[in-house]
Amino acid sequence: MNKLVGLDVSAKRVFLRADLDVPISNSNDKTPNSNTEVATRLTNIKPTIEYLLGRGAKQVVIAGHIGRPKGPDPKLSTRNLLEPIKKILNRNVEFLESFDTVEFEQVMLFENLRFWTGEIENDFEFAKDLTRMADVYVNDAFGNSHRNHASMVALPSILPHAAGLHLQKEVDELTGILENPDRPLVAIVGGAKIETKIPVISNLSKIAQKVLVGGELPIEINKTGQKFAENVVVATLMENQKDISGESQNRFAEIIKGAKTVVWNGPMGLFEEGHTEGTLVVARAIAESGAYSVVGGGDSTQFLGRQGLLSKFSFVSAGGGAMLEFLAGKKLPGIEALQ
């Protein structure tokens, strides 16, 4: 993967693919959810932008997406992120709604890439249109690097390219967990969507001393009769099946207590409905363990942000699906395109 230090950006226009997919509070108050904004994605772009400008970049165009629009939608416009990004960067940022628009502010924010169908279709002609704004390409959007989209794959095939500082950090952190963690390594997998979690659990069971499984996954595992290695501990659930049982909470906390490294993706229960006990027990156990801890996934980080526990973790991944696919040992198209 090409690193930023090897990319000549002096007097160049830089297309910076960023993780901008943060929840907007509501249609009347078009501001990002403060926990997400402060804790993860928007703040992650600052070091890369400062690096680029510090090395003489002529202009940085920040580009990304919000949600899954079916066409232009003011509620999902990245214009809604303009003021928060100005505040984070402590500088003026101008909005760019089309690659046909000529602007000369040093930092620009481009419209939601998914307003164009060519983005998710990985259309080469759309990627060529994007090159009107840039001379070089930098990918700092780890959270979207598992998507085979034009701004992730086609665009870096046209322009000189490199990984942004945060994306590089994501890859280094997760590679370290897979290849050389301090042991014992404990992996925790929760949430739902069993079809996306089975490869992760199976791969992590080969390298972790224990893999703890909670959330809605035990329900699906019991239904399908899915079998895992002996070091995979599947939680029992409370009677309402909306949180892990007290017995599993205690067992998970005891296992975590002895860990040197912990990686976690997915809550233990339906905290959105008030079933927070299992997730909170696990979170506190990790914070108190002294282990090197990595957490990812929107639900997990949202919960930790609300509980004031996010700062207790060593590294917060901006990826949900991308983190899971990386930990499952899969190659991510957006990262492969940076080779």
Image (tube, helix red, strand yellow):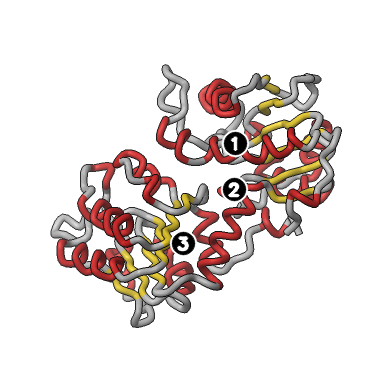
Q: Which residue is mark 3?
A: 196
Look at label 2 and name its amino acid.
Answer: Asn
Query: In the shown orientation, is residue 7 left or right of residue 90?
Result: right
Q: Are marks 1 and 2 in contact (CB under 8 Å)?
A: yes
Numbered disc 2: secondary structure: helix
Residue placed under numbered mark 2 in the picture: 144
Q: Earlier in the sequence, mark 2 or mark 3?
A: 2
Q: Which mark is residue 65?
A: 1
Residue at disc 1, secondary structure:
loop
- Residue type at mark 1: give it: His
CA distance separating discs 1 and 3: 23 Å
Residue type at numbered disc 3? Thr
How far is mark 2 from mark 3, CA to CA?
A: 16 Å
Rendering coords of residue 73 (x, y %): 56, 25
Give the class, few, some or many, for how many residues have Cα within 10 Å of label 3's Cα (few <14, many ≥20): few
Give the residue displayed 55% in from the left and 59% down from the top. 173
